[in-house]
Image: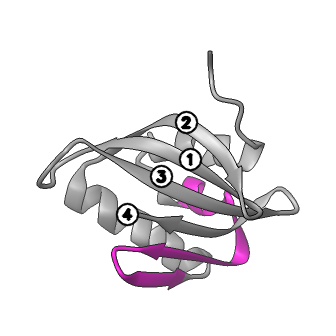
């Protein structure tokens, strides 16, 4: 059965399969933050740059496997496959949503 995800999260994973960092950034609110690999990325320009850099470094793909609501966030477990040790791995993507946009994302 396909996962039922909020539209903003659906758009995020669809944009992950493109080479368009701006498409991914449009899923986020203007003041959104991302926590990934020990870094905090803030704002749309920084999010687009982060997307371009991580795609170039890891040449990764993501496949959502499961989703659950926890503490007001949507936690999506996704299989991430790419050019990094231990690939593929299942990672948790914790999305905070507001007004149809992603306001926070923590990947770990």
x and y percent of residue 13 in the render?
Answer: 54, 43
Residue topped by disc 3: 20
Above or below, comparing residue 27 to residue 53 in the picture: above
**Of marks 4 and 2, which one's residue comes earlier in the chain?**
4
Give the CA distance from mark 4 to mark 1: 22 Å
Q: Are marks 2 and 1 in contact (CB under 8 Å)?
A: yes
Q: Which mark is residue 52?
A: 4
Which one is in front, 12 or 26?
A: 12
Distance (Cα) linking label 2 and label 1: 6 Å
Between tags 4 and 2, which lies in front?
2
Say if mark 3 contacts mark 2, CB within 8 Å.
no
Element marked by disc 1: strand
Picture layout, residue 57 above or below residue 13: below
**Which residue occupies the extreme top position in the image?**
1
Q: Quadrant of the C terminus?
A: bottom left
In magenta stretch: residue 30: yes
Find the distance from the CA under tag 3 to the CA under tag 2: 25 Å
Residue at figure coordinates x 62%, y 15% from the top left: 1
SS at badge 4:
helix
Mark 2: secondary structure = strand
**Which residue is under mark 1?**
76
Q: Which residues are magenta?
A: 22-41
């Amino acid at each position: 059965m396909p996962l039922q995800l909020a539209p903003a999260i659906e758009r995020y994973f669809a944009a992950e399969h493109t080479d368009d960092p701006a498409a991914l950034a449009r899923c986020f609110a203007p003041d959104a933050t991302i926590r990934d690999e020990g870094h905090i990325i803030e704002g749309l320009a920084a999010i687009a740059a982060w997307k371009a850099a991580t795609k170039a470094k890891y040449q990764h793909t993501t496949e959502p496997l499961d989703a659950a609501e926890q503490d007001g966030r949507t936690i999506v477990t996704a299989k991430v496959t790419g050019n990094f040790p231990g690939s593929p791995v299942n990672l948790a993507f914790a999305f905070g949503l507001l007004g149809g946009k992603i306001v926070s994302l923590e990947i770990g």
